[in-house]
Amino acid sequence: MNYTRTKILVATALFVCCLIALLTLQDHVLFYQEQHTLFLFTCDYFHSRPLLDWLSDFVVQFYHIPWLGATITSLLLTAVYLLTEGIIGRLTGLRDWLQLGVIVAVGLYFTFDGVDETLRMLIAALLALLLMWLLSVAAGRFLPIFRPRRALFKKHFSIFGLQLSIPFILSIVLTAAYIYGGLLWEMHDYNRPERAMVRADRAVKAKDWDEVLAITDKYLSTGRTNRLMLYFRNIALAEKGVLLEHMFDFPLRPGVSALVFPWKGDSRDSEYGHLVHEVTGNLNAAHHWAFESMTSWGETAPHLLDLARYNIAMGRPRAAQKFVDRLSHSLFYRDDAETLQRQIDGVEPPELHYAWSGKQEEKTRFINVYNPIRDLMEIVNADPDNHIARQYLKAVLLAANDQDALVTVLDKGATDPSAIEEAKLIYSLYPQSTPLDTLGLTLTQEVRDRFARFRALRSRPIEMEPQFGKSFWYYIYNYCPTGPDKRNSLPSDTIIPGAALKH
């Protein structure tokens, strides 16, 4: 088999392997980079960025369609191989049977295999190789370092009826070794938790709540504690209407911050903090978070889309128009811009629910970025049918171990989830607490019997966790940041030493 066919075979194998790796192992990287990059066909965008960043962003925009972006990137890596092979051949007069170009291509693959990496190195290397190839075309005939040795390795072997030379076999073996070595390196440094978090983020943006729960449950079932995964999971539970039933299925060590991110000025938190405010209808707070995130990460498609949607729902068409105009200059978000434009023009209704829609929001009310309880209470009062906000209000009060406020927002005579029943029992144990009957609330004997068993197991934590690990009681004595007794007034025989339950 001649060298040209060998080169085509190696290039094809490299392209296919890169394409498969990008669409399987690195699919989350494609999504993350596309979501954090927005290429705009405007003069100000071109002049605001260095050439390498501009070219990198141009390629990354095609990641919006994963197979298309992966194909283009694989072609760039294949071009690196072909250019390297061409340079070696023209300068030395020898054929690259060692396939050194594959090493260069595989090495460049690892320069953008993380979510925080860019294609700058690949673009720079490709431009440099292209320049070197052009120079080698001019100088290659006059400056060969070695004389061609066409008689080298003339011996052939017959395998399955094919006449294969030693150089061809060497090329195939070395190419396979380079690619396999790259795969081993990739798996050694592969960040599975990072991939799970990005996939969960993608499912949240797609509003695929079953997929969100599948990803987060699989991640948390390994024993890891991750505030972002708990946060995504709680949003999915609320959307499905079962937040109160399942919020303690996994250790809620972060407490309230696993439900609502506190404002700390952290760029990572700001990227996701708007989500819970969006689903609860508190779009003013969601706008605050999204705008602060845009100042940290720049103009990305998610930021512009969110800010446009929030302003449309809150009746601010002029503010929304600025973000829609920017989106209209992109390649893959023009359809979204047209949809948002129809909403601005009143042809279509806003897609988001605003808790104060049709009502006058207090002019002097400020967003409470440290304690979400007041905002949630105001949302529930302004929008009584907002079931997600009502779930979140009760969940935050549970996570904060604030039974005094919790009992005031419970529905009289309603059948409550087990976590609420357990919180009512703790409340009833406080001296001078208002009797539950007076509040129109009830407590079943079954809950009292379960608490008696809970107390009986206080000295046997290994037996307690399988039975009560998903209970509100277990949470307040093990994970609640404020501790089990906020008042320091529970009868001594009801307090279970937290240390005895640690594991």
Image (spheres, helix red, strand yellow):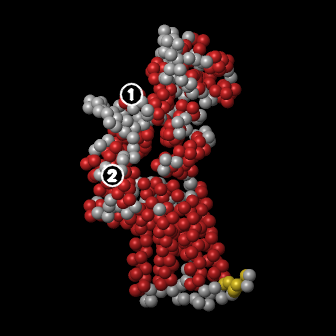
- Residue 239 location (% of width, % of height): 50, 40
Q: Is disc 1 placed on a helix, strand or loop?
A: helix
Left or right: 239 as drawn, with respect to 498 = left
Q: How crowded is mark 1: few (under 14 residues within 10 Å), some or many (20 or more)?
A: few
Q: Nearer the viewer, residue 126 or 141?
A: 126
Q: Which amino acid does label 1 sit on?
A: Asn
Which residue in the structure is indicated by mark 2? 347
State the residue at coordinates (33%, 66%): 51
- Tell me how far mark 1 sits from mark 2, CA to CA: 30 Å
State the residue at coordinates (42%, 30%): 384
**353 relative to 61, above or below:** above
Q: Is disc 2 placed on a helix, strand or loop?
A: loop
State the residue at coordinates (40%, 68%): 124
Left or right: 239 as drawn, with respect to 318 = right
Tell me which numbered mark, 1 or 2, is placed earlier along the sequence. Answer: 2
Q: Which of 101 and 60 is in front in this view?
A: 60
Which residue in the structure is indicated by mark 1? 381
State the residue at coordinates (46%, 23%): 409
Q: How crowded is mark 2: few (under 14 residues within 10 Å), some or many (20 or more)?
A: few
Q: Nearer the viewer, residue 169 or 282?
A: 282
Q: Is residue 130 visible?
A: yes
What is the number of the mark on residue 195? none
- Residue 232 location (% of width, % of height): 50, 42
Q: Which mark is in front, 1 or 2?
A: 2
- Residue 439 location (% of width, % of height): 49, 15
Left or right: 95 as drawn, with respect to 332 = right
**408 relative to 309, above or below:** above
Q: What residue type is labelled 2?
A: Val
- Residue 287 location (% of width, % of height): 34, 42
Q: Can residue 112 be seen in this view?
A: no
Left or right: 52 as drawn, with respect to 99 = left
Cβ–Cβ under 8 Å for marks 1 and 2: no
